[in-house]
Amino acid sequence: MNKTIFSQIMDHASRYQFDYLVKKYQGNKKSHKFSCWDHFLCMSFAQLTYRNSLRDIEICLKAQPKKLLSMGIIGNPTRTNIANANQTRNWRIYADHAQKLISQAKKLYQDDQPFSVELENTVYALDASTIDLCLTLFPWAKFRKTKSAIKLHTLLDIRGSIPSYIEITDGSVHDVNILDELILEPGSYYLMDRAYIDFARLYKINTELCFFVTRAKKNLNFCRVYSAQLDRQSGLICDQIIKLTLAKSANEYPDRLRRIKYYDKETEKTLVFLTNNFEVPPLIIAELYKNRWKIELFFKWIKQHLKIKSFLGTTSNAVKSQIWIAISTYVIIAIIKKRLNIKISLYSMLQIFSLTLFEKIPFHDLFFGEEVKPTLTPTENRQLDFSDFID
């Protein structure tokens, strides 16, 4: 085995597609000594080994100079070259590459069944996570008068917890605006919290033959058209067909809606759902919305285990490049896990990779050999095991 573990990981990174994108955006036009692929490999290495600075990356890579070529790194990985690449290489190369990887991962996880009930439709959770930044260093990321921030808008496929759509904006962009950017899939479910209640946009989802499930606001004005009979022992309080009565809301959403009130015994909270699906039993609607929390787990996980809270550059291009490469790294590991049928959690895989990237041993020996233990001392405080939602 002449390939390092790092090189074997990057074999799953769609090099042909990457080179096509580099040519499309002329990524290597002004630099041939340190290519976009070299940049991608160095930043992926930083993700997998939890490097905190450009100096860290340079020191670690140059500690094994004879293995750099076998890792696929041809250019000189100095902090100057990496910093320059962060500033100048078009971030869209890495964004489009991440989307290509996401498409591959979706196909691998499409048969996973995440629910306790049978449901053939694709189910997405939509949410946004804010990453705070220093106003002095990142003035372009508008948020508040005294703070900068960016938002990571994500549409998560509940099967396998794979992000199907990601948009990075400055913090001032309201969450609901992303509904205008989505390409809706007829028959799919979209799970959203109350921040996405905009009846004109929800009606568009309805006219596109998609289903939404969201939480109703307390000041919702409506009239009841019909109430279904319920077994209150199940926690259901009401299952109603309603029409909006406020003039503006009724004009934006002229059709009927379904309102379900449910008492969750686990959280001891009463939840009120709005949906445009009138066929699915009310308990399944409640079960669907419960799965929306997987996107919260996703955000928590990537913030803990990927380097997207401290940045190796201050420009918009540098920040977006780092985030998209981090997402690519995450998806590559998810692809490897599925393709090789690795049973340990993604968290454990990352811990193993962080210590073995320079080793020249096959994946099979790494994950299925008797000498390899799947549990390692984590480099960071463990608060969430990704195996909770990727098996």
Image (spheres, rainbow, N blue to C red):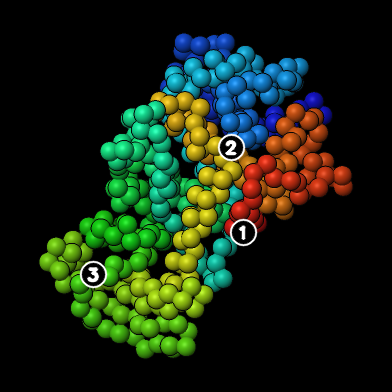
Q: Quadrant of the N terminus?
A: top right
What residue is shown with label 2?
329
Q: Position of residue 141 (x, y in %)?
A: 34, 34
Left or right: residue 183 versus residue 320 is: left
Q: Earlier in the sequence, mark 3 or mark 2?
A: 3
Q: Quick one: 232 or 255, which is closer to the camera?
A: 232
Left or right: residue 123 versus residue 206 is: right
Q: Is residue 174 visible?
A: yes
How many neighbours does mark 1 have within 10 angstroms: few (below 14), some (14-19), or many (20 or more)?
few
The quadrant where residue 364 appears: top right
Q: Is residue 25 above or below residue 123?
A: above
Q: CA distance from mark 3 to mark 1?
A: 36 Å
Query: What number is the disc on residue 219?
Result: 3
Q: Quadrant of the C terminus?
A: bottom right
Q: Position of residue 208 (x, y in %)?
A: 31, 57
Mark 3: which secondary structure? loop
Q: Is residue 388 above or below residue 290?
A: above
Mark 1: which secondary structure? helix
Q: Residue at x 69, y 45 (%)?
A: 378
Q: Quick one: 248 or 3, which is closer to the camera?
A: 248
What residue is shown with label 1?
388
Name the amino acid, label 1: Asp
Mark 2: which secondary structure? helix
Tell me, yes or no, whether the two marked residues, 2 and 1, touch with CB atoms within 8 Å.
Answer: no
Name the amino acid, label 2: Thr
Name the amino acid, label 3: Asn
How many neighbours does mark 2 have within 10 angstroms: few (below 14), some (14-19), or many (20 or more)?
many
Q: Position of residue 332 (x, y in %)?
A: 60, 39
Name of the residue lying farthest toward the front:
146
Q: CA distance from mark 2 to mark 1?
A: 20 Å
